[in-house]
Amino acid sequence: MPPANFDSIVFDRLAGPASDVGVGQLFQHLEHTATVPIPVDWALDIDTREDLAQQPPECGMEANIR
């Protein structure tokens, strides 16, 4: 499954799945979804704070990790 962004309204439901398969199933059951094409270099896989901390500065994501 490609990277996905979710609104904070579904964060509680996202906390349950332990794998991408679970998230994929959640995505299929949400009412308002859209698939949006993006450049390949924008498709960052960030699942943990460590993943975020490893992103290069040019990606534009500040790693404010507590």
Image (cartoon, rainbow, N blue to C red):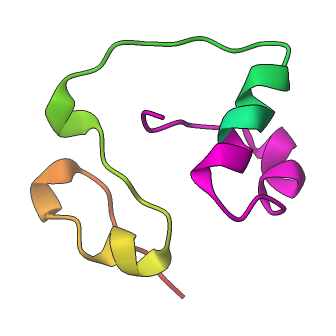
Q: Residue at x 71, y 65 (%)?
A: 18
Q: Residue furthest bottom?
A: 66
Q: Residue at x 39, y 81 (%)?
A: 50
Foreground of the two, 52 or 30: 30
Q: Position of residue 14 (x, y in %)?
A: 78, 53
Left or right: residue 24 versus residue 59 is right
Foreground of the two, 61 or 34: 34
Depicted 31 relative to depicted 22: above or below: above
Q: Position of residue 1 (x, y in %)?
A: 48, 35
Q: Residue furthest front?
A: 21
Left or right: residue 16 versus residue 37 is right
Total number of numbered labels? 0
Q: Quadrant of the C terminus?
A: bottom right
Q: Position of residue 54 (x, y in %)?
A: 24, 74
Left or right: residue 61 versus residue 32 is left
Q: Which residues are magenta?
A: 1-23
Is residue 60 a member of the stretch shown in magenta?
Answer: no
Foreground of the two, 45 or 66: 45
Foreground of the two, 30 or 62: 30
Depicted 23 relative to depicted 51: above or below: above
Q: Residue at x 29, y 38 (%)?
A: 43
When asked about the image quadrant of residue 53, the answer is: bottom left
Is residue 15 a member of the stretch shown in magenta?
Answer: yes
When asked about the image quadrant of residue 7, the answer is: top right
Q: Residue at x 80, y 62 (%)?
A: 15
